[in-house]
Image (cartoon, rainbow, N blue to C red):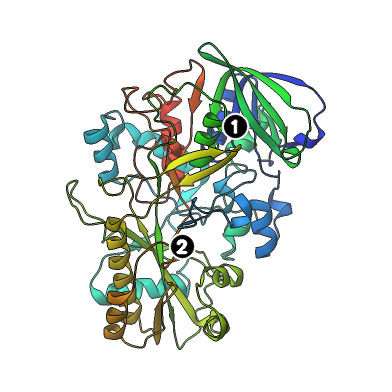
């Protein structure tokens, strides 16, 4: 399948465009929504804020990739700077820059949605066929190549401690095991939305516009009748707006972008629920150095995980977290270490011998992890998000778990990624250090690559933003088709769940 034809909005000189269906966002949800509309014979357009970069354009250089492919050049944070948020802003959205981990929605998450949010139609049986379809679409399969050392050390430590772990399915075809997935796949092996759904949609006639900033939705009575769009490079200037009309509008701009656009458009929100309950997977990091070379920048980034530390009981109070590893590239490491001077230099010199584990905390499953709120100030979108004492308890637990796993795997030194973290040579010294470290915001380094919620689906308008088909409660022809529909976080990497949910909703 040829990659999609793309039009830069900088080159559009028509003041009015008209389609049957307009999709805002080209990530997993937007791409699949566009494809399904094309398959019904509709005239479809997709608008993506980021550049229209494809396989031939990807450069395996961190500084270039972050600038070209990520929101705010990978510098996006929550409003107070407590959490660094990695999000895509390019053709394919997050699917173009993620690490290819492809998980189904966990059973506990589905049970929570059914029992606490009355989403009884979302269950393992009703979603089974949709997961099978989207797995085939994006090439999800068991990864047969042995894990790189970064992942293998996680497996070794867990095995020695008697803790369960498993292999991560990946959405790749013909992967060459380079390890640079976060910079856009230079071989085309990663089956992102521009390689799959957008490519098929383009072959069926979809118009795909990049460098397109959707300023707002235009509303008459209970319908959206048009978008105001301008070139992304002209957002701060005085460039005239283009008007894009359609019968149906689909927002798939991500769980910050979608609520942000709706708030900026002043859509009806009688219950003041739009943008509320926006969730992350707040993620802590623990580093370790080993005697043997790890080379954590080579090989498939994520191939081993453990869900052993996620509770199985809906009423379990204890914070839960998923263990994975991140790839470690020089710029990512340098900007993640809250250290300075000699300490920073010494760790950077040991990059090739460094291993890291990350713990992704579930969000939204307990009253003391209520999520954040998307805000719009002077046209700019922010996520106001608080790290509660309950979540800080989970951070401390996760650091202890990761440190124990790394020492069990044979680490020479282990260090929490924390403003006051120190390298230590024994498990007992590490436990003593963690017990004395503050888990307060800005002391502990917290990141998230996953944003969910803010337009939660549900049956009652007083308790949700969309109905159970993802239609905005207060506008007839506005639909949401991304992770902002989730009423909690997932507890796992979200791409596959977004695709299966969208496929389910399109039936």
Q: Secondary structure at mark 2?
A: loop
Q: Secondary structure at mark 1?
A: strand
Left or right position of 287 against 370: right
In this rendering, the label closer to the viewer, 2 or 1: 1
Determine the residue positioned at 26% across, 61% down. 308
Q: Position of residue 174 (x, y in %)?
A: 58, 56
The residue pinned by badge 2 equals: 302
Left or right position of 360 against 22: left
Q: Position of residue 258 (x, y in %)?
A: 52, 35
Screen quadrant of the C terminus: top left
For residue 60, say whether it is visible: no
- Which of 132/14 is in front? 14
Please say if 356 is above or below 266: below
Q: Position of residue 70 (x, y in %)?
A: 61, 52
Screen quadrant of the N terminus: top right
Determine the residue positioned at 51% across, 21% down. 478
Neighbor class of circle 2 (other Cα within 10 Å; few <14, some 14-19, many 20+) is: many
Q: Which numbered marker is on residue 24?
A: 1
Distance (Cα) linking label 2 and label 1: 29 Å
Please say if 446 is above or below 112: below
């Amino acid at each position: 399948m040829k990659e999609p034809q793309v039009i830069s909005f900088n080159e559009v000189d028509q003041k009015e465009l008209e389609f049957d269906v307009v999709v805002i966002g080209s990530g997993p949800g937007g791409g699949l929504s566009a494809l399904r509309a094309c398959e019904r014979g509709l005239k479809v357009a997709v608008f993506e804020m980021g550049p229209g970069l494809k396989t031939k354009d990807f450069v395996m250089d961190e500084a270039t990739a972050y600038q070209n492919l990520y929101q705010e050049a990978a510098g996006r944070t929550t409003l107070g700077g407590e959490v660094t948020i990695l999000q895509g802003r390019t053709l394919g959205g997050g699917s173009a820059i993620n690490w290819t981990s492809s998980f189904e929605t966990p059973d506990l998450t589905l049970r929570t949605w059914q029992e606490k949010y009355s989403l009884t139609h979302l269950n393992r049986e009703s979603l089974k066929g949709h997961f099978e379809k989207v797995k085939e679409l994006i090439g999800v399969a068991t990864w047969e190549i042995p894990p790189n050392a970064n992942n293998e050390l996680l497996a070794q430590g867990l095995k020695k401690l008697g803790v369960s772990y498993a292999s991560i399915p990946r959405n790749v075809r013909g992967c060459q095991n380079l390890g640079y997935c976060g910079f856009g796949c230079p071989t085309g092996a990663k089956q992102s939305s521009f390689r799959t759904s957008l490519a098929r949609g383009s072959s069926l006639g979809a118009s795909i516009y990049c460098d397109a900033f959707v300023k707002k939705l235009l509303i008459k009575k209970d319908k959206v009748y048009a978008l105001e769009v301008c070139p992304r490079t002209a957002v701060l200037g005085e460039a005239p707006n283009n008007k894009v009309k359609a019968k149906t509008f689909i927002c798939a701009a991500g769980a910050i972008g979608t609520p942000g656009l709706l708030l900026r458009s002043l859509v009806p929100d009688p219950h003041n629920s739009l943008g509320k309950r926006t969730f992350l997977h707040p993620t802590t990091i623990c580093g370790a150095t080993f005697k043997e070379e790890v080379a954590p920048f080579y090989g498939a980034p994520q191939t081993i995980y453990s869900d052993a530390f996620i509770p199985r009981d809906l009423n379990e109070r204890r914070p839960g977290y998923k263990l994975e590893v991140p790839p470690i590239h020089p710029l990512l490491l340098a900007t993640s270490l809250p250290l300075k001077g000699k300490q920073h230099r010494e760790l950077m010199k040991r990059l090739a011998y460094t291993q890291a584990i990350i713990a992704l905390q579930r969000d939204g499953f307990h009253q003391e992890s209520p999520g954040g709120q998307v805000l719009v100030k002077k046209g700019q979108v922010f996520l106001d998000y608080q790290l509660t004492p309950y979540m800080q308890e989970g951070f401390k637990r996760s650091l202890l778990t990761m440190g124990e796993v790394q020492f069990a795997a044979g680490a020479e030194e282990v260090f929490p990624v924390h403003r006051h973290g120190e390298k230590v040579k024994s498990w007992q010294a590490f436990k003593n250090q963690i017990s004395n470290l503050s888990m307060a915001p800005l002391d502990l380094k917290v990141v998230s690559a996953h944003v969910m919620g803010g337009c939660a689906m549900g049956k009652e308008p007083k308790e949700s933003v969309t109905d159970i088909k993802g239609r905005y409660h207060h506008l007839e022809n506005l639909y949401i088709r991304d992770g902002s529909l989730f009423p909690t976080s997932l507890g796992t990497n979200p791409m596959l769940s977004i695709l299966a949910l969208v496929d389910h909703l399109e039936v």
